[in-house]
Amino acid sequence: MKVVILAGGFGTRLSEESHLKPKPMIEIGERPILWHIMKIYSHYAFNDFIICLGYKGYYIKEYFAHYFLHESDMTFDFSNGNQQIIHNQSVEPWKVTLVNTGLETKTGGRIKKVRPYIGDEPFMMTYGDGVADVDIKDLLKFHKSHGRIATITAAQPVGRFGALSLSDDNIVDVFKEKPRGDLSWVNAGFFILESKVFDYISDDDTFFEREPLENLSRDRELVAYKHLGFWHPMDTLRDKNHLESLWQSGKAPWKIWK
């Protein structure tokens, strides 16, 4: 199953760093947060990624273009015509498709633009700026069990984010992006989506968090997977510093890989 990662936004609330690089490339522990997210999925053997590019997308292309060399031990033998010898390969078994989805394209539009790379198969989707200790295999099992179009991972941080109102059987009754009320379950990303979700996305100007999710919840096709563990987005410099401190402590909750 392919994993779509939205990595094209401007990251304006992290302007201290995002004016130099796209937000998913801002580093935690000297690694882009995008790398951390991919490691979470890779831990569960999901290694086929489609990354939606936008703002400074060339930065992400250059990172992966040189990733193999940067992660390997090498000898450059200039006495023999600059022969390059790779001694040790320590890269993950990733397949990474990088798609230019437009500078101004909204989240829903970016998802629709990568449909040719997905086909009619179900796929996973998340944002390029949040980490969690979500059990991806349990999430997939849950998605298959209910038979609806979309599964959204719901978490319970101190409210600042898009909120969900859930029925007793975990159907999403109401989806509101960043409400002023005190609803406690919020959109943590880590979606699993059937291909029918493309029918809910109109065009490049569609925010996935608005009409598509609102209409999926209206049609009772959006089901919440309740995640009671760790989840944290990197929206601000304060968030980045918090995640960095967790990483440096050696106790980063999202580091589920060895």
Image (cartoon, grey):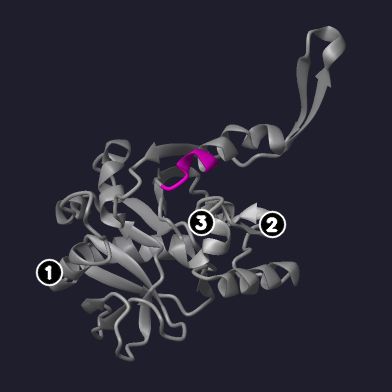
Q: What residue is rendered at 49% in x and 69% in y?
A: 235
Give me the C-alpha separation between circle 2 and circle 1.
41 Å
Q: Which residue is mark 2?
A: 258
Q: What residue is rendered at 38% in x and 60% in y?
A: 140
* Count of picture labels: 3
Q: Does the CB distance between marks 2 and 3 fall below 8 Å?
A: no
- Disc 1: CA contacts within 10 A as few (<14), some (14-19) or many (>=20): few
Q: What residue is rendered at 18% in x and 54% in y?
A: 201
Looking at the rendering, the stretch of residues picked out in magenta corresponds to: 55-59
The amino acid at mark 2 is: Lys
N-terminal of the pair, mark 3 or mark 1, is 3
Left or right of residue 79, residue 120 in this image: left
Q: Which residue is mark 3?
A: 23
Q: Nearer the viewer, residue 163 or 11?
A: 11
Q: Secondary structure under badge 3?
A: helix
The amino acid at mark 1 is: Asp
